[in-house]
Image (cartoon, grey):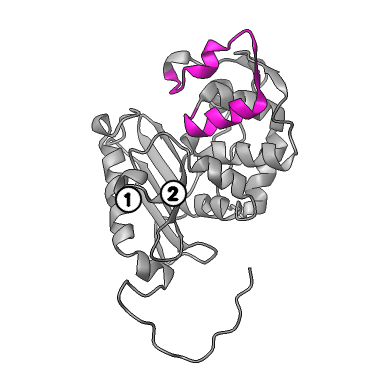
């Protein structure tokens, strides 16, 4: 299943393919955890004990597997403390699973559910932590749709510091790989064997920004960090490049070298 939703920033989708089809959320749910921390006014200087034991939503405890984590930095701090801000940063920039569960423990599941609700999500949610397999086996699944991921990123419009952090995502092998070098993009991707997704706010220099969400579930997704080992990453890059080529149509902006037709004075736009 390949789902694609394209929308101008602040506008409704102009293209949709399977936008409401549910997919395993993978690491895209980390955007909602970040927003929940921020909106709770969390003290980013708080020293958080770095542990690898978490309360399962099904009862009991669960732990993360360091071999399944893309970021070694939080693991080097295990048994000590780390600033909450550092953990939030590594959760986004290097997709740390350990940091995510530590941040989720601070934010709380209800606050994360409220982020999804405020975004207007209809078929997405993240009721459990990363690798909370007892909760998964009990029927609690982290799910997303491409349409809801666009809504989630749209909901960050008044939080530029969160978008700035998303711009520092280190894994630029899928959506970002389909853009010209140096193009501004605030994005979060997620990958597991059998699925690779990405949602991003793309900021071209020659037209207004636009949103793109691509969710793929299928055999092309190897779960590898790098595109050279994951055909699904290359697929997402091709979709991103195709949307980039049509960016002026997506955003309603005239292409370079064209002047818009005079149609009278336009009313002031609300911001």
At 62% across and 7% down in the image, what residue appears? 79
Query: Of all residues shown, which one is farthest toward the top?
Result: 79
Along the line of sight, which residue is nearer the eye, 46 or 65? Answer: 46
Q: Which residue is drawn at 64% across and 9% down?
A: 80
Magenta stretch? 68-95
Q: Name the residue under label 2.
A: 185
Taking the spot 60% from the left edge, 31% from the top edge, the residue there is: 88
For residue 136, say whether it is visible.
yes
Q: Residues within 10 Å of mark 1 (few under 14, many from 20)?
A: many
- The answer to which image quadrant residue 107 occupies is top right
Residue 57 in view of the camera: no
Q: Residue 97's x, y, as percent?
A: 52, 24
Left or right: residue 252 versus residue 101 is: left
Q: In this view, does 128 lie above or below 239?
A: above
Q: Are marks 2 and 1 in contact (CB under 8 Å)?
A: yes
Q: Quadrant of the C terminus?
A: bottom right
- Give coordinates of residue 245: x percent, y percent: 29, 61
Q: Is residue 230 left or right of residue 46?
A: left
Foreground of the two, 245 or 112:
245
Measure how far apart labels 2 and 1 are at the Cα level. Answer: 9 Å
Question: Mark 1 = which residue?
Answer: 179
Residue 84 position within the rendered picture, expressed as x and y whole percent measured from the top left: 66, 26
Q: In which quarter of the image is residue 137?
A: top right
| Picture coordinates of residue 177, whole percent (x, y) | 31, 44
């Amino acid at each position: 299943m390949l789902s694609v939703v394209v929308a101008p920033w602040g506008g409704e989708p102009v293209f949709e393919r399977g936008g409401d089809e549910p997919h395993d959320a993978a690491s895209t749910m980390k955007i909602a955890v970040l927003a929940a921390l921020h909106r709770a006014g969390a003290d980013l200087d708080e020293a958080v004990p770095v542990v690898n034991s978490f309360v399962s939503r099904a009862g009991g405890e669960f732990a993360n597997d360091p071999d399944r984590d893309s970021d070694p930095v939080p693991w080097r701090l295990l048994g000590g403390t780390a600033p909450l801000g550092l953990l939030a940063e590594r959760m986004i920039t290097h997709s740390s699973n350990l940091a995510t569960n530590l941040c989720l423990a601070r934010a709380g599941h209800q606050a994360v559910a409220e982020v999804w609700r405020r975004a207007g999500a209809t078929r997405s949610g993240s009721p459990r932590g990363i690798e909370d397999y007892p909760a998964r086996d009990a029927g609690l699944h982290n799910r997303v749709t491409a349409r809801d991921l666009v809504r989630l990123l749209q909901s960050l419009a008044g939080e530029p510091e969160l978008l700035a952090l998303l711009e520092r995502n280190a894994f630029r092998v899928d959506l970002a790989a389909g853009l010209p070098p140096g193009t501004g993009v605030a994005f979060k991707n997620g990958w597991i064997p059998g699925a690779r997704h990405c949602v991003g706010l793309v900021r071209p220099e020659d037209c207004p920004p636009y949103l793109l969400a691509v969710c793929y579930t299928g055999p092309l997704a190897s779960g590898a960090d790098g595109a050279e080992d994951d055909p699904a990453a290359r697929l997402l890059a091709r979709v991103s490049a195709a949307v980039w080529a049509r960016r002026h149509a997506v955003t309603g902006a005239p292409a370079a070298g064209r002047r818009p037709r005079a149609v009278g004075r336009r009313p002031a736009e609300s911001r």
